[in-house]
Image: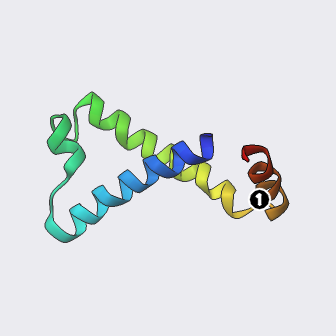
Amino acid sequence: MLDRISLIVLIIGGINWGSVGLFKFDIVSWLFGGQGAILSRIIYTLVGLSALWCISLLFRSRDNDEIFEDRTR
């Protein structure tokens, strides 16, 4: 479950960075009151933590994924 939440947050962060790169428009700061606003900083922090968590996905064995898939069926 934590893997999926982290991936969703990371995708949201990626879309935001794509928006910054292409259009010079920061969606998070626009929605939550600027880059210095506490809510924006919390979201930026969550995206960063999600990215760190997702690094672990690169080093997990495929056997764990297959076991997880069997339990969800």
Left or right, 6 with reference to 33? right
In the rendering, at what x and y percent does residue 48 appear? 47, 47
Mark 1: which secondary structure?
A: loop
Residue 58's quadrant in the figure? bottom right
Residue lying at 14% horizontally and 67% vertically, measured from the top left: 23
Residue that label 1 marks: 60
- The one of 42 and 11 positioned closer to us in this rendering: 11
Left or right, 32 with reference to 48? left
Residue lying at 15% horizontally and 35% vertically, measured from the top left: 33
Location of the N terminus by quadrant is top right
- Please identify the residue farthest to the bottom as the structure is shown: 22
Q: Is residue 15 above or below residue 21?
A: above
- Please state the total of marks drawn on the protein image: 1
Q: Is residue 33 above or below residue 61?
A: above
- Please identify the residue farthest to the front as the structure is shown: 73
Left or right, 39 with reference to 1? left
Residue lying at 24% horizontally and 68% vertically, measured from the top left: 21
Left or right, 15 with reference to 5? left
Q: Which three-letter amino acid code belongs to the residue tagged 1?
A: Arg
Residue lying at 32% horizontally and 36% vertically, measured from the top left: 41
Judging from the image, the colouring scheme is: rainbow
In the rendering, at what x and y percent does residue 45 appear? 42, 40
| Mark 1 neighbour class, 10 Å CA radius: few under 14, some 14 to 19, many 20 or more | few
In the rendering, at what x and y percent does residue 32 appear? 20, 35
Q: Is residue 52 above or below residue 59?
A: above
